[in-house]
Image (cartoon, helix red, strand yellow):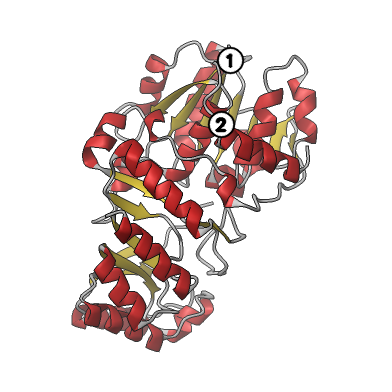
Amino acid sequence: MNNELLEKKLRDLSFSDYPSLRKEKIALIVPPSPQQPTPGREFLITGPFEGFTYIATLIKKMGFELQVIDCRLKESPVSHVLENIKNVSAVGIATYCDSYLFLEELTSLLKKEDPNLPIFLGGPLVTSLPELLLTKTQADFAVLGEAELTLLELLEDLFKSDWQERIKTIPGLAYKNKDHEIILTEAREQIKNLDNLPLLDYSVWPNYESILKNGQILISSTRGCPHSCAFCFKTIPCVRSKSLSHFEYEVAALKKQTGFNYTWLNDLNFNLGLERSLELAKILKKHEIKFHCFSRVHPVSEDLMTTLKESGCLGIWFGIESCDQDVLDANRKATKVSQIDHALSLAEKAGLAARGLFIVGLENESEEALKKMVQFIKKGTFLPLVKYLVPFP
């Protein structure tokens, strides 16, 4: 099915009631992470991931019985899955940059219990290295990049007797053939209209009651990033934006559904367009939602910083990375040191809490560049968050 028809199908599903349950049950698994989040980002191990919630919501909208197993805070994550997974027809596992050992062990044990159980992977790690992950784990196939349209096709074919033949024509997949060779189908086009996505259903999460109690969720108004920073792998490269009217519909509907009063705004670049950013802030203010957001240091304006402060923004996280121009240029950051100073100055003038995100270990970094970073942080009034560059696949 071509993407245009699939998007229509996605929209029809998104704006319809949940159908009667099919006989098949799908388990979706969130892997654990050995990483400790930087201060202020503890939501990474407690909060409900937005992208994962979209996939779980879509599967539920398709009529499948759904079981979500969250392993992030479990002492024995593999044992937790094996003890809790019950009578499933297929298993989907999210893959992140640090989840390989979990994937290797879990897929092996699941196949040992049921060699015919279909296992599919999705997320940034398998998108970056599909051949390696399918070779080294017992998973059958992988959904690459943006998953919704591919899953619409895959899950309609998966439970038919000839599913291994059918998936060969589905774009956006990697799979093992009968000779255990890894085959990649043609690349999948990204969704053109984000307004076609379903309203997030956070009730899919096992800790839904605590989500309601905390009043905190993650939402976004865009997907993708137009920039080409050398240290970043982009699972979803093309930038698309929800319409402002649809974004407001989502905010209002989710507030009615969950009662949330705070969101981590998941846009990679909140300030892609200044006029649109101002309108987003006004929408969140109208619905009395406090928020944090990510931003580049350019473009910014005094009006944006003031509006963010007045709208209930609790803080803006600037991707600074380095204070040395040679390092910024070598890593294709496309910003100037003067723009860093300007952005932080405007935030401080507006009384808006600012955080600076820095990376140690970038290309062309020297001892002198590190000294500049330390001096810059010491004299600043913002909160610095410094991480080492880690070479993930």
In the image, 377: left or right of 218?
A: left
Q: Position of residue 311 (x, y in %)?
A: 28, 65
Q: Residues within 10 Å of mark 2 (few under 14, many from 20)?
A: few
Residue identified by numbered label 2:
16
Amino acid carrying mark 1 in the image: Arg
Q: Residue at x 62, y 60 (%)?
A: 238
* Residue placed furthest toward the bottom: 338
Q: Residue at x 65, y 53 (%)?
A: 192
Q: Nearer the viewer, residue 346 or 92?
A: 346
- Label 2 residue SS: loop
- Label 1 residue SS: loop
Q: Residues within 10 Å of mark 1 (few under 14, many from 20)?
A: few
Q: Position of residue 186 (x, y in %)?
A: 77, 45
Q: Quadrant of residue 215?
A: top left
In the image, 136: left or right of 338?
A: right
Q: Residue at x 63, y 38 (%)?
A: 10
Q: Is residue 74 visible?
A: no
Q: Is residue 315 visible?
A: yes
Residue 281, above or below 115? below
Residue identified by numbered label 1:
22
Amino acid carrying mark 2 in the image: Ser
